[in-house]
């Protein structure tokens, strides 16, 4: 019996392989790619036949990659990057081409930038599909693995293959309920107040953006939350405070009162971050320019 030709490994098959590798699950890979589980299973069967290796073995509720699968991760990503590079100089018409992008962003930059961007582009007739994952304190591997193609974050990851551009700059503010308390008027009063803090899935917290202050003096948080949208429910009707950028007043924390910090603290910058593979892609360049225009309008 002849072996399946290696040319059966097209870009979609390779993208599916990387997604299964990242998700360790056929069902999660199917959800992420927007296809059925049977389609993923069929693709995996093709890969196993062509490569002569099981690639993944079942372990509990998930899949564990074989040594062969792990060794293929980097070369497969390089092949996909090379295929993408073939189209870098292609003519691009935003009215003719559908644009699909996965973005890593937390609540505030996501809610400030992308709803108005989507409304504007839909009015223009542009077909844009957006997917979001939380960025937390982001890892460059999110971009390197192509899990996302763009980040918006105040804490941009570093690396020779990682590009960044500052989009927004905003001072930190105290958010509180004026019916319940006045904002702290000194460093000591701030440190002694009861705080709400957002802690991301990797264990790091939102205080990482506070520069130039001794955070060890600040009282441990009374409430720790997984995202910013939950903050108003806890602050309203209480004497709790939250420290976040002034831009939050236009997004998740619009229902709260706010006041300046009673001490010196550097403002927070929000960066747009992407991998070098996307730097010259015409659709990616075009979308970055439109995002930058929205951000500029917000600052004015």
Image (spheres, rainbow, N blue to C red):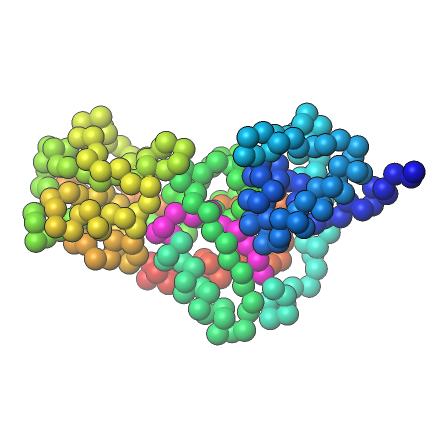
Q: Is residue 82 left or right of residue 114?
A: right
Say how many tags the image has. Answer: 0
Of residues 290 and 130, the one nearer the viewer is 130
Q: Quadrant of residue 244?
A: top left
Q: Quadrant of residue 51?
A: top right
Of residues 4 and 7, the one nearer the viewer is 4
Residue 53 inside the magenta-drawn segment: no
Q: Is residue 256 left or right of residue 81?
A: left
- Which residue is rendered at x = 51% and y = 57% of the image? 130
- Tell me, yes or no, if residue 289 can be seen here: no
Q: Position of residue 201 (x, y in %)?
A: 39, 36
- Tell me, yes or no, if residue 150 can be seen here: yes
Quadrant where the C terminus is found in the figure: bottom left
Q: Is residue 242 above or below residue 287?
A: above
Q: Position of residue 209 (x, y in %)?
A: 32, 38
Which residue ends up furthest to the right in the rendered image?
Answer: 1
Q: Position of residue 74 (x, y in %)?
A: 67, 33
Q: Is residue 112 above or below residue 147?
A: below
Of residues 129 and 237, the one nearer the viewer is 237
Q: Is residue 74 above or below residue 175?
A: above
- Which residue is rendered at x = 91% and y = 39% of the image? 2
Which residue ends up furthest to the front in the rendered image?
Answer: 60
- Which residue is rendered at x = 88% and y = 38% of the image? 3
State which region is magenta. Answer: 99-109
- Which residue is rendered at x = 34% and y = 51% of the image? 108
Q: Is residue 183 left or right of residue 133?
A: left
Q: Is residue 118 left or right of residue 195?
A: right
Query: Which is the main secondary structure of the residues drawn in magenta?
Result: strand
Quadrant where the N terminus is found in the figure: top right
Q: Position of residue 295 (x, y in %)?
A: 40, 58
């Amino acid at each position: 019996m002849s072996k399946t030709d290696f040319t059966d490994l097209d870009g979609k098959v390779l993208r599916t392989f990387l997604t299964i590798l990242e998700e360790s699950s056929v069902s999660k890979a199917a959800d992420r790619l927007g296809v059925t589980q049977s389609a993923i299973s069929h693709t995996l069967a093709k890969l196993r036949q062509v490569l002569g290796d099981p690639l993944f073995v079942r372990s509990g509720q998930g899949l564990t990659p074989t040594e062969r699968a792990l060794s293929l991760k980097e070369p497969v990503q390089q092949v996909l990057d090379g295929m993408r590079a073939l189209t870098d100089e292609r003519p691009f018409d935003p009215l003719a081409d559908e644009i699909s992008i996965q973005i890593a962003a937390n609540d505030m930059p996501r809610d400030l930038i992308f709803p108005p961007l989507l409304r504007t582009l839909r009015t223009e007739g542009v077909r844009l599909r957006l997917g979001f994952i939380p960025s937390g304190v982001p890892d460059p591997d999110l971009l390197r693995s192509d899990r996302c193609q763009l980040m918006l974050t105040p804490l941009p990851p570093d690396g020779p293959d990682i590009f960044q551009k500052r989009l927004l700059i905003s001072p930190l503010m105290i958010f509180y309920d004026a019916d319940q308390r006045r904002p702290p008027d000194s460093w000591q009063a701030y440190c002694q107040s009861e705080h709400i803090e957002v802690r991301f899935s990797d264990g790091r917290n939102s205080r990482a953006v506070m520069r130039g202050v001794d955070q060890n003096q600040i009282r441990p948080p009374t409430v720790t939350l997984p995202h910013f949208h939950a903050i108003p429910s806890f602050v309203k009707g209480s004497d709790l405070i939250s420290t976040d950028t002034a831009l939050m007043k236009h997004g998740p924390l619009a229902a709260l009162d706010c006041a300046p910090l009673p001490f010196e603290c550097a403002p927070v910058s929000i960066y747009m971050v992407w991998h070098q593979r996307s730097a010259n892609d015409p659709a990616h360049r075009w979308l970055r320019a439109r995002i930058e225009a929205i951000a500029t309008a917000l600052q004015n």
